[in-house]
Every structure is written in C-alpha cells, then in structure tokens.
Amino acid sequence: MLASFALSLLLATSALASPFNDKFGPCGTHPSAEDVIAAEKQFLEKKLENPQRDDGTLALRNLTIYWHVISEDNSVAGGNITDAQIASQIDVLNKDWKIMGVNWILGNTSRIVNKAWYYNWYKSPTDLAMRTALRRGSAEDLNVYSVGQVNYYGQRVGYSSFPWDYQSSPVNDGVVLDIGSLPGGSIPGYNLGRTLSHEAGHWGGLYHPFQGGCSTPNDYVDDTPAEADFATGCPTTRDSCPGFPGADLVRNHMDYTNDNCKTSDGGFTPGQISRSSQAFAIYRNGK
Ligand SMILES: *[C@@H]1O[C@H](CO)[C@@H](O)[C@H](O)[C@H]1NC(C)=O
Ligand SMILES: *[C@@H]1O[C@H](CO)[C@@H](O)[C@H](O)[C@H]1NC(C)=O
Ligand SMILES: *[C@@H]1O[C@H](CO)[C@@H](O)[C@H](O)[C@H]1NC(C)=O
Ligand SMILES: [Zn+2]
C-alpha cells in the first residue's frame, strides 16, 4: 500500500517535472502578437506586389540543409551525432515535407566541439557567436544547429526563425534542434524526428494553429480550425474552440502533439502549403 502510494506520488511528480508543462510547451518559437501583426501587414503587402503562386500551383524544389553538429566532446552521447542519424532525420523531414513540394538535400555537415554553444540559449550572445561563425548559404538554405539543450525560458525541443526576419537579420536565420528529438532520441513523445518537420514549418512561414487562440485570423491560414492552446499526447477528438467550426487538427505538424500522432499524409493543410509556398516565393529567393 505504502509502496504503491510512493510509486504513484513518484509518477505524479515526474509527470509534473516534464520540462514542457508550461505555457510555451516543447517549441521555443513564440512571436508576440505585435510581431505577428507587423509581419502579416508586410507579408500581405508583398503578396499583393508579387502574386507568385497565388494560383495555388506548387513548385517542386530541392532545398539545401547545412547541418552544424555542435557537441561538448567527440562522443555521440556528447552531441557528436553520426552521419547516419542526420540521414535518418532528413528522411523523416522528406516524408513529412513531400506534400509541401520540397525535397531536402544535405549540403554539408560541419562538426564543432563547443560546450557553451552545446547548451543553447535563445538570442544569447553565445547563440549569436555560434551562428556568426557557422551560418552558410542564402535565404533559401536551411541551417540546422543540433545541440544538447535548447533553452527558451526553460528547456525546449527546438526553435526557428521566420522567413520575414531574414532580410534584417540573415545571421539568425535557421533552426536550433535538441539532439534528443532526432529519430531514436531521448525525449519521450518527441523522438521520431518530427520536431524538425515542425520547426521547418516555422522557417517556411507557418505559425502554430493556436497562435491567436479562439479568434480569427488566429494563424492566418483559413483551413486550420482555431485552437485555444496547444495539444499534447494525441487527443483525437479535441475541440478547444467550440464556438468556431472544426475540431483541433491534432495530427497537424504545427501543433505540439506527440510525434506518433502526426501524419506525413496531410500533416500540413492545403492552406498551410499555399501560405508557405508564398513565403518561399517572397522571402526565400523564389524557392
Ligand atoms: C532535385 O535534385 C535531383 C538530384 O539530386 C534532380 O534529379 C532533380 O531534377 C532536382 N529537382 C528539381 C525540381 O530541381
Ligand atoms: C565526431 O565523429 C566523427 C565520426 O562520426 C569523427 O570523425 C570526428 O572526429 C568526431 N569529432 C569531431 C569534432 O568531429
Ligand atoms: C563542410 O563544412 C566544413 C566546415 O565548415 C568544411 O571544412 C568542409 O570543407 C565542408 N565540406 C564541403 C563538401 O563543402
Ligand atoms: Zn513551434
């Protein structure tokens, strides 16, 4: 009796201790409402000036990834992940992103031992130093920094920049990813490699479907039903904004549900695909 009480207390405590049980959840990409309004005003103006892909055609394209392996020592456990792990992560990304028309190709892998960079803090001087030293390519190239810990007001699985921020701050363009989120990684619920599919979604111009809560325009995509706040696990009948049409899209890549809840086939809606396609056309050199 006492033992089972102690066990359930332990389980309850460890559930509460999950690093993602706060208002930010697993992802550290959280633009303020003011930033979203400013970005959307500019995006709308640019879409009117450049109506590329407004006809809904999807450009099939190859995009390059520059992968920066940051480690605290030379071991795999210390962050020096293998080429095979990177390849299996890019396989997952390619399956999930096929419906976006994108085929991701690994351009180059760099390997750097740097303990300060390995424990990454969002917008810290060490984060900027890392990017300044390593970032490669142009607006249409995805730089991925794999690290041992991602900190944004607490531990996260990853975060990304948005395409409209490239011009004013190219050095900050890219995704920071916790190695525990790679396929076979150590983060429960988020270790099938779908964190990168999600962060690349931000990098391609998508918000979370709960960005604006139960409101219109919420995430500026017409066919993603409004969502009050993020979903975790896989609550397939969740409808967090009953006053708005449609249940929550818990299988969508841009929600926070577990990796095994997400789907490659339909994990992005036609509205998200079209929005992202326009963002690439406008902000990522027409790609
Ligand atoms: C993508 O790259 C492959 C070779 O890696 C090539 O065969 C294919 O034509 C390219 N696709 C596009 C749309 O450029
Ligand atoms: C990291 O691992 C690779 C093999 O995957 C090895 O060649 C390399 O020496 C290790 N360390 C660094 C800093 O590259
Ligand atoms: C990849 O990047 C590393 C580190 O910047 C560099 O030493 C290497 O030459 C690059 N390889 C290729 C094929 O560009
Ligand atoms: Zn996110």
Image (cartoon, helix red, strand yellow):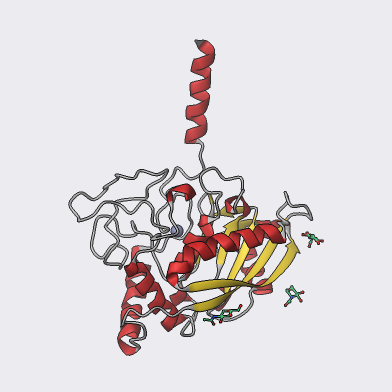
Q: Is residue 202 visible?
A: no
- Where on the picture, by quarter, is residue 121? bottom right
Which residue does the image show at 54% across and 53% down from the upper left? 157
Q: In the image, is 74 to the left or to the right of 268? A: right
In this view, the residue in front, 277 or 12, is 277
Query: Residue 65 appears in which quarter of the rendering?
Result: bottom right
**Relative vertical location of residue 23 with respect to residue 197 in this rendering, above or below:** above
In-image side of 144 versus 263 (left or right): right
Picture layout, residue 180 above or below residue 167? above
Judged from the image, the quadrant occupied by ligand 4 is bottom left
- Total labels: the figure holds 0
85 horizontally vs 224: left or right: right
What's the residue at 30%, 59% (across, down)?
Answer: 212
Residue ID at (36%, 82%): 53
Q: Residue 61: x percent and y percent?
A: 50, 79
Q: Is residue 78 above or below residue 94?
A: above
Percent of width and height locating residue 101: 45, 73
Task: Work out which residue is located at the far left of the displayed protein and give it.
Answer: 243
The answer to whether residue 61 is seen in the rendering is: yes
Q: Nearer the viewer, residue 255 or 88?
A: 88
| Residue 120 location, quadrant | bottom right
Residue 187 at what x, y percent from top left? 57, 45
Residue lying farthest to the bottom in this orientation: 49
Position of residue 132 measured from the top left corner of the image (x, y, whole percent): 65, 73
Given residues 83 and 136, the one toward you in this image is 83
